[in-house]
Image: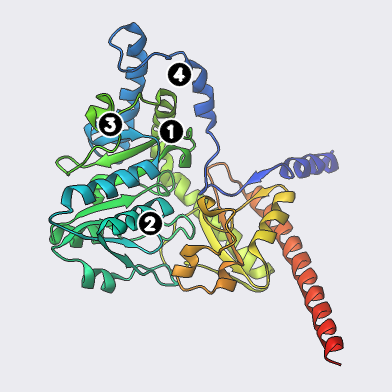
């Protein structure tokens, strides 16, 4: 009986194990359960007749629940297609509003591509942008920030937590220094939701972006926080949706799913402790049982679910594919950059060498990750790393032998 139970446990653990929650999260069962009833509200939320009332109520409720959880007013929430849209809306909008009066912008070197590329775009239009360095420890260079921010600065954009290393930046401190010179502050808070408490009132940011699919909800939906009286320029024209701030018929299903999960944000403190314990256990075992592993950014504050590491003499893409064949989903960097032969720009910006960056592995845990999955993953990781290093060593020896023969 005991032997049979062990076999059942082994079979269960050998199913697909997802450890890439910073890329996207699986749909919550609570969301899945409510989708059929939400789909019944098929009307246009802008319609004033009976078919529009239920979808309008779903959107209103989601806005209220999310705003309450974030400690802001529902009128300060704009629903959109996701954080990439929100980031572009803020950066391009503030450039247009202030281009004739304030021409200076700042952001960190390790921002999400949707932020960096938006700043690169306004640079081409004539803006001056300073990119704040981040150390190998994962710390923002505050001296650089203080030296370059000025009364000519229109906007500062710094993510609350990095998607690859999990490092958390001192947003509240940055906001105070930004407001002191009369500039506005935007933060990409995508990676924070559901991992650590997020109180936008305490942070005092002017703008913040969120994405539903990073918090167990449907893709194609996000939220942009715009503090009351903060300047904002419409990005998408159309009808009067979102108080005339974002045109287009609302994604009722996606917004409602976001609202379902927003109701669970009071669980974050408990989940935070649980995730941190799992992450710490995983890192301790990996460092103890696998040679040549170093953690990235672990000397600074990090999200409780995220672990970035470098495995010496291992190609990250080969490791990822090998683990994929074993049923594990992990990442070598940001999902938005997958498929690129170049190493992670974030890790390079932090001072890692190209070789180190190409040997990186990111593991990001979620609410459903458990100890059994983590221990099983580590056991397989050890086997895969040993096999890849043996192959690499044999290949190197073969190449060395061939070189010697050719030299004779």
User: Which element is circle 1 on?
Assistant: helix
Residue 78 image point, x, y percent: 29, 34
**N-terminal-most mark, 2 or 1:** 2
| C-alpha separation, residue under disc 4 versus residue under disc 2 | 36 Å
Q: Residue at x 42, y 14 (%)?
A: 41
**N-terminal-most mark, 3 or 1:** 3
**N-terminal-most mark, 3 or 4:** 4
| C-alpha separation, residue under disc 2 versus residue under disc 1 | 29 Å
The circle drawn on residue 116 is 2
Is residue 72 shown above or below 94? above
Q: Who is closer to the viewer here, 128 or 64?
A: 128
Is residue 251 shown above or below 98? above
**N-terminal-most mark, 1 or 4:** 4
Task: Find disc 1 in the rendering and name its residue.
Answer: 261
Mark 2 and mark 1 residues within 8 Å of each other at the beta carbon:
no
Task: Find disc 3 in the rendering and name its residue.
Answer: 237
User: Which element is circle 2 on?
Assistant: helix
User: Which element is circle 4 on?
Assistant: helix
> Closer to the camera: disc 4 or disc 2?
2
**N-terminal-most mark, 3 or 2:** 2
Q: Residue at x 59, y 73 (%)?
A: 355
């Amino acid at each position: 009986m005991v032997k049979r139970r062990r076999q059942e446990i082994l079979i269960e653990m050998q199913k697909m194990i997802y450890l890439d929650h910073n890329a996207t999260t699986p749909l919550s069962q609570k969301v899945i359960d409510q989708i059929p009833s939400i789909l019944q509200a098929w009307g246009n939320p802008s319609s004033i007749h009976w078919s529009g009332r239920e979808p309008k109520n779903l959107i209103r409720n989601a806005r209220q629940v999310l705003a309450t959880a974030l400690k802001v007013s529902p009128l300060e929430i704009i629903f959109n297609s996701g954080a990439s849209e929100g980031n572009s809306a803020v950066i391009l909008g503030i450039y247009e509003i202030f281009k004739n009066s304030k021409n200076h912008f700042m952001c960190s070197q390790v921002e999400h591509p949707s932020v960096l590329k938006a700043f690169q775009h306004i640079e081409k239009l004539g803006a001056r942008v300073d990119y704040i360095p981040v150390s190998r420890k994962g710390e923002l260079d505050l001296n650089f920030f203080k030296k370059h921010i000025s009364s000519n600065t229109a906007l500062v954009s710094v993510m609350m937590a990095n998607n690859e290393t999990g490092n958390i930046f001192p947003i509240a401190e940055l906001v105070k220094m930004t407001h002191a010179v009369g500039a506005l502050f935007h933060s990409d808070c995508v990676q924070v939701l559901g991992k650590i408490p997020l109180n936008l009132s305490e942070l005092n940011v002017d703008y913040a972006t969120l994405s539903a699919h990073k918090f167990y909800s449907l893709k194609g939906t996000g939220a942009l926080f715009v503090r009351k009286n903060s300047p904002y320029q419409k990005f998408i024209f159309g009808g009067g949706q979102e108080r005339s701030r974002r045109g287009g018929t609302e994604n009722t299903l996606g917004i409602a799913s976001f609202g379902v999960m927003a109701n669970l944000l009071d669980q974050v403190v408990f989940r935070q402790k649980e995730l941190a314990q799992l992450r710490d256990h995983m890192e301790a075992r990996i460092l103890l049982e696998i040679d040549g592993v170093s953690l990235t950014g672990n000397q600074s504050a990090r999200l409780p679910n995220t672990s970035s590491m470098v495995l010496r003499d291992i190609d990250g893409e080969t490791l990822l594919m090998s683990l994929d064949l074993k049923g594990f989903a992990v990442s070598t960097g940001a999902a938005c950059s997958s498929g690129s032969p170049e190493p992670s720009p974030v890790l390079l910006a932090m001072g890692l060498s190209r070789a180190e960056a190409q040997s990186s592995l990111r593991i990001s845990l979620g609410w459903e990750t458990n100890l059994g999955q983590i221990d099983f993953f580590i056991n397989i990781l050890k086997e895969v790393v040993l096999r890849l290093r043996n192959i690499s060593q044999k290949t190197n020896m073969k190449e060395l032998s061939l070189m010697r023969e050719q030299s004779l």
